[in-house]
Image (cartoon, helix red, strand yellow):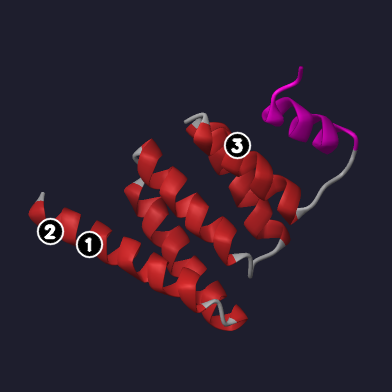
Amino acid sequence: MPTPIENLERLLASGKEGALLRFGLGNAYSQAQRWPEAIAHLQRAVALDPDYSAAWKLLGKALVASGDIAAARTAYADGIAAARRKGDKQALREMEVFLRRLANDEGQA
């Protein structure tokens, strides 16, 4: 039986490009802690839909997990802007908290 990643990759290979599919792949790879693949798909998701605040939020988390804090800060800032444009208050608040935590962690290092 194919894994969720295999099913999603098959859809992508068949030409079904879209932000939601890329988000699904990014999420599946994140759950598997395969950060480079997760990041690549999430970056594509936000390129296809710059207002996809959930994709920005997950991209920030994946970048933090991969150790790229500078890129995570940028992703969260871009995600905050997207959430404001979209009116997604929950994602906005969450990314603001994540961004503040990164700044606090940096100040304690």
- Is residue 38 found left or right of 70 in the rendered image? right
The secondary structure that most of the magenta stretch takes on is helix
Q: Is residue 20 above or below residue 65?
A: below
Q: Please, what secondary structure does the residue beneath circle 3 have?
A: helix
Please tell me whether residue 3 belongs to the stretch shown in magenta: yes
Q: Residue furthest right?
A: 14
Identify the secondary structure beneath mark 2: helix
Density class for disc 3 (Cα within 10 Å; few <14, some 14-19, many ≥20) is: some
Is residue 91 located in the magenta-colored stretch of the structure?
no
Task: Report how far apart the C-alphas of labels 3 and 2 lie in the structure.
Answer: 32 Å
Q: Quadrant of the N terminus?
A: top right
Q: Could you tell me if the residues under marks 1 and 2 are in contact, i.e. CB atoms within 8 Å?
A: yes
Q: Amino acid at mark 3?
A: Ala
Residue position marked by numbered label 3 in the rendering: 28
Residue, far front? 1
Give the residue displayed 42% in from the left and 49% down from the top.
61
Mark 1 nearby-residue class (10 Å; few <14, some 14–19, many ≥20): few
Of the residues under marks 3 and 2, which one precedes in the sequence?
3
Q: Is 86 placed left or right of 21 in the picture?
A: left
Which percent across, then down, holds residue 4? 70, 30
Give amino acid for label 1: Ala
- Distance, label 1 to label 2, CA atoms, is 6 Å
Establish if 25 lies above or below 79: above
Give the left or right position of residue 85, taking residue 6 as reference: left
Image coordinates of residue 13 in percent, x first then y, are: 84, 32
Please tell me in which quadrant of the rendered image residue 52 appears.
bottom right
The x, y position of residue 95, in whole percent, is 40, 66
What stretch of residues is rendered in magenta?
Answer: 1-14
Instruction: Work out whether residue 92 or residue 104 is closer to the camera in this orientation and state it.
Output: 92
Q: Identify residue for label 2.
A: 107
